[in-house]
């Protein structure tokens, strides 16, 4: 009976401390503060018996969440705070006492860092409650969990990493480009953009439930990249909707160059064709991303890398990049000749600038209607009687200067 009463009291205390808040797609990680009088802080880290890693806590959380890039760039105080709370989250603890702590005004930035770094710990919420001493310094944090998952934390982490290891095991033994394209495609074919899941804002939603929003896609992509041995870091900012935060990924290759992948925007919401994979935001540069990603938020804890190259973008690697209208026609005709005999549908094109994209859109689909002439020629050469030559769908994007044409068959 005493055990039951104690358990009830503990659960009541836990529920009284839990705060509810929106996920990253809807707004920033929230925080609350509470003055805790006469609370003794943890032992000064300099006086603590430290393990061989030099800290009074384990460092497994770095690999669990693929955050080596971030960890390497944190100052020592932030490392102590992050290490302690990440270990508390790993152990599904409700309250974390901080050895170093921080000024109250830093709590919001810090808890957002924690929220975004917890890619592998998909059972943690992203609203935290700070506790202060008499001077106003944050000396502890109450951690918010998805209540239904508190007892399932290790199991959920294991399931996520099972999916990551499954994907990594299936990677081709090829170039960085081939490996990363495989991981990118794996995620997009595995997941649909949706909030209609139990955990749509997490890598668990993307990899296990198969439904996620941008945070779930980006967190899953982050773990896939880290699991495959790549240095990676996430970025947050604003996409096409200023009211909603967005999240995407950076990856560093063996040649030292950084590239950007935004898997969410390569998997259009509500797409009819589940086999469609977009490549507008696969292995692109910072400059290209800025054409339609309105803002990137700057962290006070670390700097993001700069992706300067487009050499490994899908369009360059497959010679789908046009600088003249004649090249546009050649690229579309070549792709159609390759995919029609296989019954495939999608033709990809990136133009050098919006002027060429507008010219292509006009000449192909109005006026002389040259797209139909191309398909009639391809149908004749391939003997593909099922190809419909006078109907298709297209998506034109001014930002990345791309066009995707979807063919139709009887």
Image: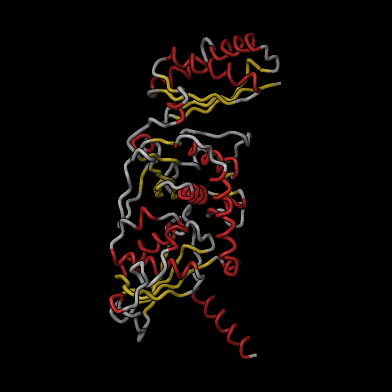
Residue 290: image location, x then y, percent = 36, 38
> Can residue 365 be seen by looking at this rendering?
no
Direction from residue 276 to residue 245 in the image, left or right? left
What residue lies at 34% left-to-right and 35% top-to-bottom? 287
Above or below: residue 88 compared with residue 158: below
Direction from residue 318 to residue 55 in the image, left or right? left
What residue lies at 33% left-to-right and 54% top-to-bottom? 299
Q: Nearer the viewer, residue 56 or 112?
A: 56
Give the quarter of the figure containing the N terminus: bottom right
Residue 196: image location, x then y, percent = 62, 52
Residue 182: image location, x then y, percent = 53, 38
Q: What is the quadrant of residue 358 in the picture? A: top left
Q: What is the quadrant of residue 350 in the picture? A: top left
What residue lies at 62% left-to-right and 25% top-to-bottom? 344
Direction from residue 116 to residue 390 in the image, left or right? right
Residue 148: image location, x then y, percent = 61, 67
What residue lies at 58% left-to-right and 19% top-to-bottom? 338
Above or below: residue 218 compared with residue 118: above
Q: How many marks on residues?
A: 0
Instruction: State how the image is colored.
Output: secondary structure
Q: Nearer the viewer, residue 248 or 364?
A: 248
Above or below: residue 25 compared with residue 253: below
Q: Nearer the viewer, residue 204 or 399?
A: 204
> Can residue 11 be seen by looking at this rendering?
yes
Q: What is the quadrant of residue 27 in the picture? A: bottom left
Give the quarter of the figure containing the C terminus: top right
């Amino acid at each position: 009976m005493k055990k039951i009463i104690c358990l009830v009291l503990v659960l009541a205390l836990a529920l009284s401390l839990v705060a509810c808040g929106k996920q990253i797609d809807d707004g920033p990680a929230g925080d609350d503060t509470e003055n805790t009088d006469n609370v003794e802080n943890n032992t000064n880290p300099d006086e603590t018996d430290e393990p061989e890693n030099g800290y009074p806590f384990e460092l497994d959380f770095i690999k669990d969440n693929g955050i080596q890039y971030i960890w390497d760039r944190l100052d020592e105080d932030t490392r102590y705070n992050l290490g302690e709370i990440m270990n508390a989250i790993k152990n599904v603890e409700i309250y974390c006492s901080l050895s170093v702590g921080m000024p109250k005004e830093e709590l919001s930035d810090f808890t957002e860092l924690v929220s975004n770094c917890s890619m592998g710990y998909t059972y943690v919420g992203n609203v935290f409650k700070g506790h202060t001493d008499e001077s106003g310094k944050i000396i502890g944090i109450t951690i918010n969990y998805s209540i239904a998952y508190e007892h399932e934390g290790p199991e959920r982490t294991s399931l996520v990493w099972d999916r990551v290891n499954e994907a990594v095991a299936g990677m081709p033994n090829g170039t960085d480009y081939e490996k990363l394209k495989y991981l990118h495609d794996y995620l997009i074919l595995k997941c649909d953009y949706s909030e209609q899941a139990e955990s749509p804002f997490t890598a668990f939603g993307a990899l296990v439930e198969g439904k996620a929003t941008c945070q779930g896609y980006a967190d899953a992509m982050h773990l896939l990249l880290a699991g495959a041995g790549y240095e990676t870091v996430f970025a947050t900012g604003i996409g096409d909707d200023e009211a909603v935060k967005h999240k995407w990924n950076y990856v560093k290759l063996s040649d030292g160059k950084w590239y950007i992948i935004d898997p969410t925007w390569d998997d259009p919401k509500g797409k009819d064709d589940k086999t469609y994979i977009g490549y507008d935001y696969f292995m692109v540069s910072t400059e290209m991303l800025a054409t339609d990603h309105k803002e990137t938020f700057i962290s006070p804890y670390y700097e993001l890398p700069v992706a300067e190259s487009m050499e490994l973008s899908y369009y360059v690697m497959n010679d789908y990049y046009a600088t003249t209208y004649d090249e546009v026609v050649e690229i579309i005709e070549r792709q159609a000749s390759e995919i029609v005999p296989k019954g495939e549908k999608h033709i990809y094109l990136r133009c050098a600038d919006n002027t060429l994209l507008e010219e292509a859109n006009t000449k192909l689909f109005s006026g002389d209607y040259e797209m139909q002439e191309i398909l009639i020629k391809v149908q004749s050469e391939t003997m593909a009687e099922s190809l419909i030559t006078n109907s298709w769908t297209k998506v034109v994007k001014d930002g990345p200067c791309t066009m995707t044409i979807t063919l139709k068959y009887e």
